């Protein structure tokens, strides 16, 4: 079965407040999925429902073909969840806690599994005997991630996993998570969009309890970012300002900056463009500037832009 | 069952490494010792209708009233606060197993405290040999009946404490609520009994009398165990544990 998570018309209400409204999506096995959305969008409610912590009011969610509402315990065996608050048993030592968690999850080879995840999260040598209450935020976070990686859960849900980690630790965790691509499905919720952009191959953008976009970054860009940024590089001191203005106005283009950017060799003009007019603009630029046209390109959209664009309707 | 055992071990470990557990144990034993000294003094100064152990166990409600809320208030409330309950609930262990693991670990500690109090009983021959030689120290049925009753009633008191702890993450509030509930249970028997006695309804009296905790204790210390009392405590304990399970479910709905 290629799909690991199947969510159909999931809704959740807290009194009159609608946290999730008819949310539907499918996640393929082995993908790293980023769940993004502004505060109060319904991310945590969705993650809690998917981890079996909380029931939905209506709709259906299944993990690996097992319905969460009908057989929650069987479904929970397929899931690992690290909550944003990352609760840990402060009265235990790191190794002891992870062994407890592994036993509670019903993992067979507890010692081997615990040692493996401690090594993966770089807590084996310097933290395994430490009391959890004495750990720094970064170490606590890594213990939480190690807990989530225990066993062979098909779906690993991580809520803000890299919060509080230093750059070196972020790289380590990123590599660990990337190493799981293909074998496990990861659903990661984070506000660090640059981080998600690096590791995720699929995104779900949620706002006001509704899914506003799903797909790869490229797919969402196509559907959500209508006006992309394009640039043309011209030979320095060879094209007058009037020619540039004439080109922009004739093609009904809006420059990003009032003054073109200058480097030692060229002059860069950036303007917003509708993606369907790209061919027309390239042809027009070649005709206008001829041999002085050194380059032409389109700025790729970042996840941040996609996020802002996808949630604009609600913010406006 | 294996997961339940893992959780039960975790709960025991949590109790053993917590300094507050030892503080509660110390308070409990201090109260028992004071009651012991007080009973002993009364016993020496005046003639008593009961044996010494019977008189001592009649005051068991005081350490129960103070100790049980202190012991149970942390069970769920603390886990709600730090989020550990959320972490446990993401595994495939059932809600009732979580409740029972907390209940049994607390009950085990409660039992250990009372077993510890037996030391006081065995100190008596050393302190006042005259009481022991007079035969008014204790009869075996005093000790077994009284302690069995304490352990039986403890099932209900701890279940009540666990239930109130499952309602809130505020430990003080959960402790206060269980204190009030247990206190009300202790008071209700004598109040009902006196009302019924004054109204003179014998049928009601026969129904109400076994509900009076002090009467139950007296009967148990005399070696008489009413099966109705056993059924009452066990069924009410299960009822409060079921309520705790419902409260736990509601917390995550």
Image (tube, coloured by chain):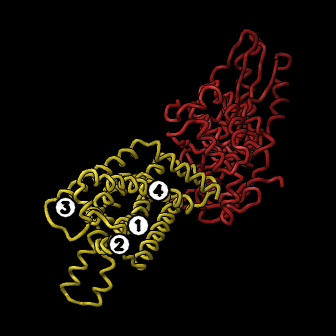
Chain colours: A red, B yellow
- Kindly identify which residue carries mark 4: B108
- Asked if labels 1 and 2 touch by Cβ distance under 8 angstroms, the answer is yes
Tell which subunit mark 1 falls on: B
Tell which subunit mark 2 falls on: B
| SS at circle 3 | helix
- Kindly identify which residue carries mark 1: B148
The answer to whether A122 appears left or right of B13 in the picture is: right
Of B128 and B90, the residue lying toward us:
B128
Residue at 63% across, 53% down: B91
Spatial CA distance of label 3 from label 4 is 32 Å
User: Can residue A253 be seen at all in this image of the molecule?
Assistant: no
- Asked if labels 4 and 1 touch by Cβ distance under 8 angstroms, the answer is no
Residue A300 position within the rendered picture, expressed as x and y whole percent measured from the top left: 74, 31
The answer to whether B250 appears left or right of B206 in the picture is: right
Query: Residue A111's image quarter?
Result: top right
Of B47 and A155, the residue lying toward us:
B47
- Kindly identify which residue carries mark 3: B43
- Asked if labels 2 and 3 touch by Cβ distance under 8 angstroms, the answer is no
| SS at circle 4 | helix
């Amino acid at each position: 079965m290629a799909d690991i998570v199947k969510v159909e018309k999931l809704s959740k209400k807290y009194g009159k407040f609608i946290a999730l409204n008819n949310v539907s999506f499918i996640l393929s096995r082995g993908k790293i999925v980023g769940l993004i959305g502004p505060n109060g969008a319904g991310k945590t409610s969705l993650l809690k429902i998917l981890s079996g912590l909380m029931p939905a009011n209506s709709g259906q969610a299944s993990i690996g073909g097992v319905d969460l509402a009908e057989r929650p315990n069987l479904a929970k065996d397929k899931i690992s969840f690290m909550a944003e608050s990352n609760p840990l048993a402060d009265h235990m030592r790191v190794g002891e806690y992870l062994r407890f968690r592994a036993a509670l999850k019903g993992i067979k080879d507890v010692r081997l599994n615990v040692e493996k995840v401690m090594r993966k999260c770089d807590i084996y040598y310097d933290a395994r005997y430490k009391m959890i209450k004495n750990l720094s935020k970064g170490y606590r976070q890594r213990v939480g991630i190690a807990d989530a990686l225990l066993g062979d859960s098909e779906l690993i849900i991580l809520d803000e996993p890299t919060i509080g980690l230093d750059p070196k630790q972020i790289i380590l965790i990123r590599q660990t998570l990337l190493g799981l691509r293909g074998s496990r499905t990861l659903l990661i919720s984070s506000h660090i969009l640059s981080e998600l952009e690096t590791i995720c191959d699929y995104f779900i953008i949620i706002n006001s309890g509704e899914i506003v976009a799903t797909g790869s970054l490229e797919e969402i860009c196509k559907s959500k970012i209508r006006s992309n940024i394009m640039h043309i590089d011209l030979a320095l001191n060879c094209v007058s300002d009037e020619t540039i203005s004439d080109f922009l106005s004739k093609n009904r283009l809006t420059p990003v900056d009032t003054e073109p950017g200058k480097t030692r060799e060229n002059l860069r003009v950036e303007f917003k463009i509708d993606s369907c007019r790209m061919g027309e603009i390239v042809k027009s630029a070649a005709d206008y500037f001829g041999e002085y046209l050194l380059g032409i390109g389109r700025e790729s959209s970042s996840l941040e832009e996609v996020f802002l664009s996808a949630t604009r309707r609600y913010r406006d | 069952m294996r997961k339940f055992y893992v959780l039960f071990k975790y709960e025991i470990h949590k109790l053993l490494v917590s300094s507050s557990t030892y503080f509660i144990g110390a308070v409990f034993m201090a109260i028992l010792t004071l009651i012991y000294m007080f009973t002993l003094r009364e016993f020496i100064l005046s003639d008593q209708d009961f044996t010494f152990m019977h008189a001592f166990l009649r005051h068991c409600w005081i350490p129960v009233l103070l100790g049980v809320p202190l012991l149970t208030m942390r069970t769920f409330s603390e886990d709600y606060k730090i989020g550990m309950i959320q972490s446990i609930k993401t595994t495939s262990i059932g809600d009732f197993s979580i409740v029972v693991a907390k209940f049994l670990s607390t009950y085990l500690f409660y039992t250990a405290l009372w077993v510890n109090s037996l030391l006081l009983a065995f100190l008596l021959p050393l302190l006042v040999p005259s009481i022991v030689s007079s035969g008014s120290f204790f009869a075996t049925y005093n000790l077994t009946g009284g302690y069995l009753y304490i352990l039986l009633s403890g099932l209900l008191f701890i279940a009540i404490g666990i239930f109130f702890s499952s309602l809130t993450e505020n430990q003080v509030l959960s402790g206060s609520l269980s204190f009030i509930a247990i206190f009300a249970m202790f008071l209700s028997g004598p109040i009902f009994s006196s009302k019924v006695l004054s109204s003179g309804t014998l049928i009601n009296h026969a129904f109400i009398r076994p509900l009076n905790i002090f009467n139950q204790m007296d009967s148990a210390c005399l070696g008489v165990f009413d099966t109705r009392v056993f059924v009452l405590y066990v069924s009410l304990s299960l009822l409060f544990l079921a309520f705790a399970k419902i409260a736990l479910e509601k917390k995550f709905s």
